[in-house]
């Protein structure tokens, strides 16, 4: 009896084997960022910074003799999507380590998936204290939590002569956490905390909140939200004749973009940031900062994006360093190796200290925090 074999399955098998062989030549890193929705501008900056890091690493020979491959997915600025993206990256794409997910609410939504699938993630931006204090041993954060920002700010509030402060924050874990941590610090310093106003992440008109804040007896407003909403706030505050000092937190302000979009309305505003691309010589790693900025410009990107994109650059370098230290691209080994890395980031040394319940600690690095001020359309370090 003559057996007949169909050609299509054989061809499909051949392609599958070729695909498998190709994948074996790369080490995947999952990237879970908002590329659409309210935080799309920031997420896109982070992804472009991540690509620069991957290209740099691969040009130097890759990791463990293989190229790294970024598997980039859009979480759509939505916590439910962020969790679904994490599951896809782990189960379908087989990424042994991830970076994400920009916003605190997005990262918090991802965290149960990390525990379920025992996969580590480098947190490049999110600042909610809950991320590293609730007992998730797969979290390794390189951005400062709002409590660290508040602690850094604590050292300069006296020189700013703050007496009474109001808050205007985005109504999510990031914004509410910032208001809580900064309020606690200010009360300890004897500063009166007034109104705490919130805004939805997609809101375009904040004039009602700003009108209420204009009518209080505070001299300062602390604002926490992403750059697109900040530019609207500055314009609307100017239109209302609000003359109070505004200080932003979170490091996602993109001051150059604010100047370009808000114009004179941005003058006099102050911003807590974790990177100083305007003054490379004052950064912890001037050579790397200069390289990164030059590469960013070479790719035709707006300079404004570097204050956000450096997070993606450092995040991928952190993941790659852990893979190298682990000696293999396996989640458990990478997780263990995270505790042993020590690399120079663009905003300070990246090494992880334990944070959270004993036995289930997350990793927290401690980057530098700076205060800058916009004056006459130019950015300067605030001298105190």
Image (spheres, rainbow, N blue to C red):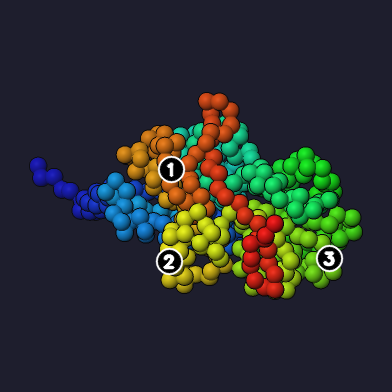
Q: Determine crowd level at label 2: few under 14, some 14-19, many 20+ residues with C-alpha closer than 10 A.
A: some
**Residue 176 x %, y %:** 72, 46
The quarter of the picture where the N terminus appears is top left
Q: Disc 2 or disc 1, which is closer to the eye?
A: 1
Q: Nearer the viewer, residue 370 or 92?
A: 370
Say left or right for 91 vs 234: left
Q: Secondary structure at mark 1?
A: loop
Q: Compare marks 2 and 1 and give the one earlier in the sequence.
A: 2
Q: Nearer the viewer, residue 321 or 287?
A: 287
Q: Determine crowd level at label 3: few under 14, some 14-19, many 20+ residues with C-alpha closer than 10 A.
A: some
Say left or right for 205 vs 342: right
Spatial CA distance of label 2 from label 1 is 24 Å
> Which residue lies at the image location 24% right of the left edge and 52% below the top edge?
18
What residue did someone put label 3 on? Answer: 242
What residue did someone put label 2 on? Answer: 295
Say left or right for 118 vs 307: left
213 relative to 27, above or below: below
**Residue 230 x %, y %:** 70, 62
Spatial CA distance of label 3 from label 2 is 40 Å
Q: Secondary structure at mark 3?
A: loop
What residue did someone put label 1 on? Answer: 342
**Which mark identifies residue 199?**
none
The quarter of the picture where the C terminus appears is bottom right
Q: Compare marks 3 and 2 and give the one earlier in the sequence.
A: 3
> Which residue lies at the image location 89% right of the left edge and 55% below the top edge?
217
Q: Nearer the viewer, residue 382 or 92?
A: 382
> Which residue lies at the image location 61% right of the left edge and 68% below the top edge?
256
Q: Nearer the viewer, residue 114 or 256?
A: 256
């Amino acid at each position: 009896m003559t057996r007949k074999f169909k050609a299509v399955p054989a061809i499909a098998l051949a392609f599958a084997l070729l695909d498998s062989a190709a994948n074996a030549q790369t080490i995947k890193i999952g990237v879970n960022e908002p590329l659409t929705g309210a935080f799309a501008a920031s997420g896109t900056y982070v992804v472009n910074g991540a690509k620069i890091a991957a290209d740099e690493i691969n040009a130097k020979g890759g990791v463990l003799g293989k190229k790294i491959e970024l598997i980039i997915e859009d979480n759509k600025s939505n916590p439910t999507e962020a969790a679904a993206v994490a599951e896809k990256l782990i189960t379908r794409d087989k990424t042994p380590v991830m970076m994400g997910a920009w916003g605190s609410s997005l990262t918090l939504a991802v965290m149960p998936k990390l525990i379920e699938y025992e996969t580590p993630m480098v947190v490049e931006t999110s600042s909610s204290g809950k991320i590293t204090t609730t007992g998730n041993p797969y979290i390794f954060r390189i951005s400062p939590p709002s409590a660290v920002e508040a602690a850094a700010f604590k050292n300069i509030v006296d020189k700013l002569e703050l007496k009474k402060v109001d808050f205007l924050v985005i109504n999510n874990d990031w914004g509410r956490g910032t208001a809580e941590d900064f309020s606690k610090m200010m009360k300890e310093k004897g500063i009166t905390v007034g109104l705490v106003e919130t805004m939805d992440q997609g809101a375009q008109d904040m004039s009602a909140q700003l009108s209420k804040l204009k009518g209080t007896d505070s001299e300062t407003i602390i604002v926490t939200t992403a750059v697109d909403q900040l530019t609207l706030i500055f314009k609307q505050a100017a239109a209302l004749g609000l003359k109070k000092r505004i200080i932003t937190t979170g490091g996602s302000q993109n001051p150059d973009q604010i100047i370009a979009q808000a114009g004179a309305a941005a003058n006099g505003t102050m911003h807590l940031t974790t990177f100083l691309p305007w003054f490379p010589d004052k950064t912890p790693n001037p050579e790397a900062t200069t390289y990164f900025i030059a590469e960013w410009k070479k790719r035709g990107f707006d300079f404004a994006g570097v204050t956000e994109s450096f997070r993606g650059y450092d995040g991928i370098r952190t993941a790659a360093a852990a893979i190298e230290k682990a000696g293999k691209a396996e989640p458990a080994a990478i997780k263990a190796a995270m505790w042993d890395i020590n690399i120079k980031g663009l905003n300070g040394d990246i090494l992880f200290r334990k944070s959270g319940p004993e036995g289930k600690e997350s990793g927290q690095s401690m980057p530098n925090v700076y205060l800058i001020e916009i004056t006459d359309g130019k950015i300067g370090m605030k001298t105190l």
